[in-house]
Amino acid sequence: MKQLECENLTLGYGSQVVLTGLSFEVNEGDYLCIVGENGSGKTTLMKTVLGLTKPLDGSIRYGEGLSARDIGWLPQQTDVQRDFPASVQEIVISGTLGRGGFRPFYSKADKALAESAMARMNITGLKKRCYRELSGGQQQRVLLARALCATRKILLLDEPVAGLDPKVTADMYELIDSLNKDDGVTVIMISHDVDKALQYASHILHIGSELFFGTRDEYRIYEADKAKGGDGR
Amino acid sequence: MSELFTTLGSYLERPFVVNALIVGVLIALCSSLLGVTLVLKRYSFIGDGLSHVAFGAMAVAAVVGLTNDMPLVLGITVVCAVLLLRVGKNAKIKGDAAIAMISVGALAIGYLLMNIFGTGSSNLSGDVCSTLFGSTSILTLSTFDVWMCVILSVIVVLFFVLFYNKIFSVTFDESFAQATGQRAGLYNLLIAIVIAVIIVVAMQLVGSLLISALVIFPALSAMRVFKSFKGVTVCAAIVSVVCALIGLLTSILAGTPVGSTIVAVDIVVFIIFSVIGKLTGGKA
């Protein structure tokens, strides 16, 4: 089932154009990696898909019954969060707030959802701990659990392993992969690491001076061709 | 010692003292509740900035000759709060610079206007001084003032309780809140309006130079010791109320200026809490 379709997008802010002619689509269960150099517009693309910024041109269509708010988001950490006094539980359950309607307090269902999200991320034991005292990997799990509280359909991850050590990075990739394979969550991930992207992703979107969208295998061929072309000259 | 309590008892029989205590406690409660959010959002100085705006607006009201300057002062302050908190993020002049600019600008224009046009009073610097440092007007409140303060405080506390979860969410991660369909813009707007109202009301208590203290000190003290948002919020509210009470009683008994006495108590409590935080292993 098609969940997201972007057609001929032009991205940017104000009068500054970052990216033009971008088209791609995401189907249910896909694992899409967005790669590209710094400043190529990866984060802008993500914010546009989330509905935080409007595209300058082109269209974004969401699948049947879906909207921008069905996309769970794992943003990059901000300075404010690093020393924020909040317990893990408080943060995770705040993910349920987007479910619409004016409800001043959390319901039983919200609490159950938060519990199950924490259990899925293996952080139930950290429930009462203070967020700012956790390690980088644990903090990412907390934010991932919060994203799961918002939706279980699509997850958008913005460099989820930035600043993590190799062991924790590997665990994080495994966890995301299992969310995709075992729980059927569609994953869209921004990544610097093309090798890891090729290991896990089903589709690759390369943005920058050259645009590429296709499956992982198509991307391998595309890269190989490019390398050959480079040698031939 | 017993003498002290007798004096205190005789003071507490006077309605103006009771009024001052009620208003002082309520203002302290309200300002500390939103203080937590403002400190965490890195808007600690907004209290200072907005109170200077209120000062400027008061000067304008005095020059124009309004007898009841409250609506005008409140209106201008609310507009500035909204501009700083909401539009500020995308503006060309960012956060701290925008606050500083509006703050000193309003202060200068206010003083200038009062000087040029005169307010009819012979003691201009006295007037300015009492607006800046809080006058003794907290001890001369009318019943109307007290009721207005009570009603506003009830509204603020209700707002805070009903929107507590949303305020947390918007403070912790505004973009996530917005991306998952929470109306972050609306909540920010409400927070801005409420903070402006609190500041205009609180100016009577501590004056516009010391208002930031009421907003930030209880929140900072609570953050030394507590580690959850709820813990910090509840603790800040209690600290703020206790400090205001101690400060008010001390100033009445010792004849010290109300505003600075309260702030002095806040500072002492902050130091105590920092030490406690260090000892119990909290991250200071």
Image (cartoon, coloured by chain):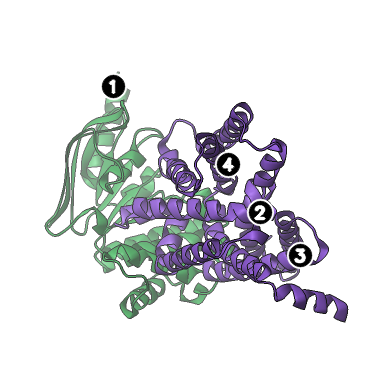
Please, what secondary structure does the residue beneath circle 1 have? helix
Q: Is residue A92 left or right of residue B115?
A: left
Residue under disc 1 on the same chain as residue under disc 2 = no
Distance, label 2 to label 4, CA atoms, is: 13 Å
Q: Which residue is mark 2?
A: B206
Q: Residues within 10 Å of mark 2 (few under 14, many from 20)?
A: many
The quarter of the rendered structure image containing the N terminus of chain B is bottom right
Q: Give B187 or B112, whichever is nearer the viewer.
A: B112
Q: Which residue is mark 4?
A: B55
Q: Is residue B146 left or right of residue A22?
A: right
Distance, label 2 to label 3, CA atoms, is: 14 Å
Q: Which residue is mark 3?
A: B252
Write down the colour of chain B.
Answer: purple
Q: Chain of mark 1?
A: A
Q: Quadrant of residue B244?
A: bottom right
**Residue B226 can be seen in this image:** no
Q: Which residue is mark 1?
A: A232
- Whether residues under marks 4 and 1 lie with C-beta atoms below 8 angstroms apart, the answer is no
Q: Looking at the picture, how far across and down is residue A105, in whole percent?
A: 37, 73
Mark 1 vs mark 3: in front = 3
